[in-house]
Image (cartoon, coloured by chain):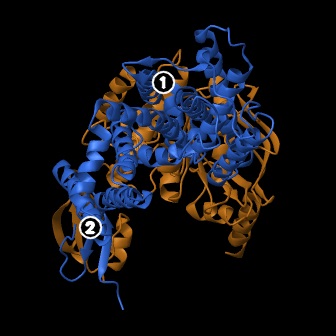
Amino acid sequence: MVIITHKLNEVMEISDRVTVLRKGKSIETLNTKDVKVSQLIELVVGKKVDLSISKDIIEEKTEILKMDDVTVLDPEGKNALEDVSFELCTHEILGVAGVANSGQKELCEAIAGLIKVNKGRIFFDEQNIVGKTPREIIRLGIRMGFIPEDRLGMGLVASMDIVHNIILKDYQNQPGIVLRRGPCIEKAKRIVQELDIQTPGITTPVKKLSGGNIQKVLLGREIDSSPRVLITAYPVRGLDIGASYKIYDLLNEQKKKGVAVIFVGEDLDVLMDLCDRIMVLCHGKVTGIVDPEKVTKDDIGLLMTGHSMEEIEADKKEGELDD
Amino acid sequence: MTNPIRITKRADLSRRNEILIRLLAVVLSIVCAGLALMIMGLDPIKIFSSIIEGCAGTELRIKQTIVKAIPLTIASLGIIVAFKMNFWNIGAEGQITMGAFGATLVALNVPPTTPTAVTLLLMFICAVICGAIWAFIPAIFKAKLGTNETIFTLMMNYVAIKFVTYLQYGPWIDPNGGGFPRIAQFTENCILPSVLGVNIGWIFAIICVVLVYLFINHTKTGYEITVVGQSYETARYAGMNISKIIVIAMLISGGLCGTVGMIQASAVEKTLVATIANGYGFTAIITAWLSKLNPITCVFICVAFAALIQGGAYIQIALGVSSAVSSVVQGLILFFVLGSEFFIQYKVSLKHKDKEVA
């Protein structure tokens, strides 16, 4: 049986032998029991990778985005988000954890102005942006970057090349009716170089690139617009380990610059390592906003399934008493 | 039982093979058309040479071909703008008809003493507005209610044609026509002038090609239309006003088709008839598609099609064959040329031999 995956722990757990492919070449075939994960990563990426995510806590934080009692209904009229409130500060990465479809998508799209907010307010710098379209938000001079979950379906135009995908963010600020490609060609070249995007050229349609490179184009464009808030929904989904760590580094870099980052993720280890705070969603409700230094993965797991922090604390105390 | 034929999408096709496939399609179409003609008891060589003679044999025939290429080209441009947005405007025929109605509305109501330039300008403006309105109706329904534009634009064709038929038989019937259901001929000041022996529409067509090319490739709205055509979600994400873009694109599309109506009414028919669009609105869908929505390529495709139409009409008169003969020839050529697109996009292979068929 053959399994093709980029999740290395899956390889370690179920395979007997493993073949590493890189850039269309077979690199090596090994017996799984003779190999360590770190060796595999090296073979996959082609060089040694630092597998630690750095986290610098930066004290000078100011509130930039605030969600106040926001409720969003899904097309069937059920609550996709229910009375969600939280604050987001500069110089921090706020993680969002939750079982799939717990309201993560709606949370991101509500902030970006892409879906109707049925109740509540969202303040960006004390300015309520509820009810405003993405265009109006841009017009207000609000600089927001958004990496949607559906990269090719929403964030990028699959059949267009890198230059034309970069224009997407820029063209509205160009004066007149003529589309100016010149500055975007320069920008495309710079982004390709800075993010080390593997592409035959800046005129290659983005759908022909690999997942990691597609994501780098998207992230590169959003970062290049120097956003103050950067919303990322599953930014490393489907990416190999090298590309994933590159993305974490980029997010950390943004945080250091003072950007307020929202990171919607799946991997709890990564959420714990990367984020300053983690907000847990369950069925559209916030079950807790926690400091990853003070809770365990199991606690977050319980929050994800609808338990509250108080219940978890109480259970722990009971457990201690039993001992 | 498994299907022995496997169809896969081609990753990349070399330029040479692409040309080869296209050439093969043309050759095959001529061979097949020849066979079909032989079955009908006709001499294929004679028919083919007559078609060529009919479309390019004399100066007059070349002019006739160009006269037919003008409406086809402008209508194709209109369709290209809509198709770029993945808006399936099947309503060019109706938009042409309404454009002709708009031009006629002016032509029948201006005093014969009005200067030609003024009349023509008024006719032009009115034709553009009428064609654009006919495209605006399905556009606004699509933008606001998400209706299916294909059915909507198609149905609008019949409304336009029946409306003109009504005018022709009713309110606009020529009082001097002896009861014959026709609309009065335009006066001299409503007729488009000719340049180099062909109505001025050809200059207008060339200008439109350049303008549409610039619009699609070098304006912000042209870019927005392409993005909307690729993905509504991305357009929304980028902060585009999708409804507005749909309406603008369709106003341009309908406006271009409206001018076709004006040219046909003013320069070709010199009056309004219900059959003014003459199928150009439908043929333009094929030419727009074959030109891969490129305004420049579209000119060549449209001239080729016009030649086929003109040649087909000629053999009916010159050789006295039925119109079915030219339809068969045109149909077979189309069949192979459109069919070759499939082989350019996809690879067909037999499962066991894994050998390429085309």
Q: Secondary structure at mark 2?
A: loop
- Say if A235 sits above or below A175 in the image: below
Real-space CA distance between mark 1 and mark 2, rounded to the nearest whole angstrom? 55 Å
Vertical relation: A132 (above or below) A44: above
Q: Which mark is residue B219?
A: 1
Q: What is chain A's hue in the picture?
A: orange
Residue B277 appears in the picture as rendered: yes
**B283 relative to B134 in the view: left or right:** left
Q: Which image quarter: residue B356?
A: bottom left
Which residue in the protein does label 2 denote?
A: A36
Query: Picture quarter containing residue B138?
Result: top right
Q: Are marks 1 and 2 on the same chain?
A: no
Residue A115 left/right relative to A38: right
Residue A196 in sight here: no
Provide residue A266's location: percent of width, then percent of height: 53, 58
Q: Secondary structure under badge 1?
A: loop
Q: Which chain is blue?
A: B
Instruction: Name the image quarter holding the N terminus of chain A.
Output: bottom left
Q: Quadrant of residue B25?
A: bottom left
Q: Amino acid at mark 2?
A: Lys
Q: Which of the labelled discs sits on residue A264, or is there none? A: none
